[in-house]
Image (cartoon, helix red, strand yellow):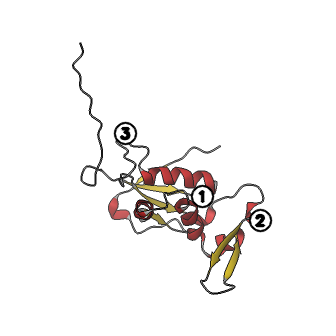
Amino acid sequence: MNTLSYKTISANKETVQKEWYVVDAANQVLGRLSSQIAGILRGKHKPYFTPHVDCGDNVIVINAEKVKLTGRKMEDKEYIRHTGYPGGQRKTKARELLKTMPERMVEMAVKRMLPRNRLGNALFRNLFVYAGPDHPHQAQQPKELKFNQK
């Protein structure tokens, strides 16, 4: 009889090793890029992934202003928000949002792919998005991360 015993490893805050990554969003499709970033933030690429623990890495996204949308989404896609007052629904086209606040477009796409609970809020705080090629996180020595897109 085989006497090997296997134990399931459950990660916790003390055992998780967090890394820093830089992702260049230039000429990347927004949806595909966002889903891959959400997986990195969640920690699904790690062998000790635990669903109820923040075991993901920190992600810095640069060149958010150069992200692409496929099809007619640039003209047709609308981002809806509400001011909180009666009749306060505001709509913004994707083209306008990309021109005025390109960081917000990437942030919203990634946030909507994370869990909608306290863990999702904590994971979202590990995302840093910048419109241009510069970021203030040089001290963390981030590694460059490239995604293969068709």
Q: Position of residue 125 (x, y in %)?
A: 42, 65
The amino acid beneath tag 3 is Pro
Which mark sits nearer the N-terminus, 3 or 2? 3
Q: Are marks 3 and 1 in contact (CB under 8 Å)?
A: no
Residue 130 location (% of width, % of height): 51, 68
Question: What mark, if any, has residue 119 been given in the picture?
Answer: none
Q: Nearer the viewer, mark 2 or mark 1?
A: 2
Judged left or right of residue 1, residue 32 is right
**Mark drawn on residue 76:** 2
Which of 102 and 140 lies nearest the eye of the viewer? 102
> Is 77 positioned to the left or the right of 125 in the image?
right
Residue under the image location 62 percent in, 62 percent down: 66
Is any atom of residue 121 visible in this view? yes
Q: Secondary structure at mark 1?
A: loop
Mark number, residue 26: 1
Q: Position of residue 140 (x, y in %)?
A: 33, 60
